[in-house]
Image (spheres, coloured by chain):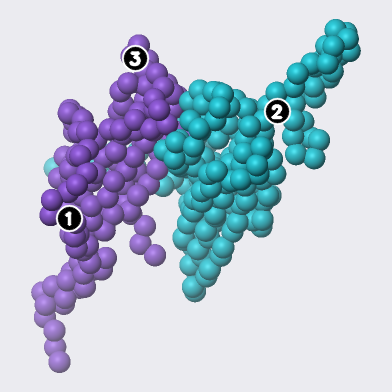
Chain colours: A purple, B cyan
Amino acid sequence: MKISPIAFFAIAALSFYSVGCKSVNNVERANPQASPSYVEDQRIITDATLANKLQILSINEATVSGDMLKIQATLQNTSLRARTIKYRFEWIRADGMEQASPANSWRTVRMQSGEVRAISGIGPSPQIRDFRLKIQETKQTIL
Amino acid sequence: MKKFLPFSLVILALALFSGCATNEARYIDPKGTETIVSLNKINIQDWNQAADELVADMLTSGVLDRAPELPALMAVSRITNKTTSQADTNSLTKKVRVALNQSGKVVTTTTMGYGGNVEDPMAQELAQMQTFMSGEKQQTRLPYYTLSGLLLEDRAKSGNTNQVTYTFQMSLTTTSDGIAVWESEKQITKIGKKSTVGW
């Protein structure tokens, strides 16, 4: 059987595309009982490709341990393949100064196609009022 | 000339996309993503992530607010390393301590330690000297909490691909009754054929 070069490349491309292409089906309560406190956010997009493939569905806040600010961002991978992203929260005190924490570093999360996932962080001290969330796509590793 | 123009553009593009890769020693951000990912040891980013997640878990649980006196006094107990790599468990406990201290919920004693090993022997000696000089028995504040933990390792291999999982377990116990009021476990799994630079 003779396969034309075009058909060969089409099959190869399809095989490559189908690798890691399984998407996630999400099921949740139709009328959520939780009443999150949403944060009005502004976004500075420098990687439009990532912004299109990874949607920030919402950002909400809560107070934990009495007076500590907790921020949660709910993300969805809207692309057709799994993606690994790295993210980091930076924390700003009431006086506008950023506060460092020894353990606050970049973290990675791998999201399957269509998956909805929450990432969160807690401000390092009760003086924290604001935050900055940085999201970047990592280099992909295929074993 | 026209022939060389596309070639030059390709070279220029390659140079631009290659970034600043160099073999020479340089400084990098220890909290950044240019650090080395090893399959045979716990890396700096692993300690950071484990400490960050454990502290977040502890604060979210609200257990620290139940102490009768804030900030509550905590002593660091035994942190057992059962991994195959030599690791200083202070890489984890110090980060947890600093983060808890910054939260204003907990302070750590440096004059009491597991097995009599104190972190600051001079402070302990000075306290004893103060007691001797004043001639009165000083009231010693005992820790309300102790922090203990365990580091575990699990390895798996398939062909040339190695997988290693490091498990960080931690417990917070109230000294008055010996009850672990908070416990948590964080796992970090790495997979690959060899160590890499950046992630």
- What label sits on residue B142 in the rendered view? 2
Please tell me in which quadrant of the rendered image residue A11 appears.
bottom left
Name which residue lies at 41% across and 47% down: B199
Where does the N terminus of chain A fall, quadrant-wise?
Answer: bottom left
Please tell me in which quadrant of the rendered image residue B61 appears.
top left
Q: Quick one: SS at disc 2?
A: loop
Q: Is residue B136 visible?
A: yes
- Judged by depth in the image, the label closer to the viewer, 1 or 3, is 1
State the residue position of label 3.
A94
Q: Chain of mark 1?
A: A
Check if mark 2 and mark 3 are on a common chain. no
> CA gap, disc 2 to disc 3?
34 Å
Name which residue lies at 67% across and 30% down: B143
- Judged by depth in the image, the label closer to the viewer, 2 or 1, is 2
Please tell me in which quadrant of the rendered image residue B10 appears.
top left
Q: Is residue B77 left or right of residue A56?
A: right
Q: Residues within 10 Å of mark 3 (few under 14, many from 20)?
A: few
Name which residue lies at 37% across and 36% down: A121
Q: Amino acid at mark 2?
A: Leu
Q: Amino acid at mark 1?
A: Arg
Residue B72 position, x and y percent, is 58, 27
How many marks do you count on the picture? 3
Q: Quick one: SS at disc 1?
A: loop
Residue furthest out toward the top:
B134
- Judged by depth in the image, the label closer to the viewer, 2 or 3, is 2
Where does the C terminus of chain A fall, quadrant-wise?
Answer: bottom left
**Lower position in the chain sequence, tag 1 or tag 3:** 1
Residue A73 position, x and y percent, is 26, 40
State the residue position of label 1.
A29
Q: Quick one: SS at disc 3?
A: loop
- Contact (Cβ within 8 Å) of mark 1 with mark 3: no
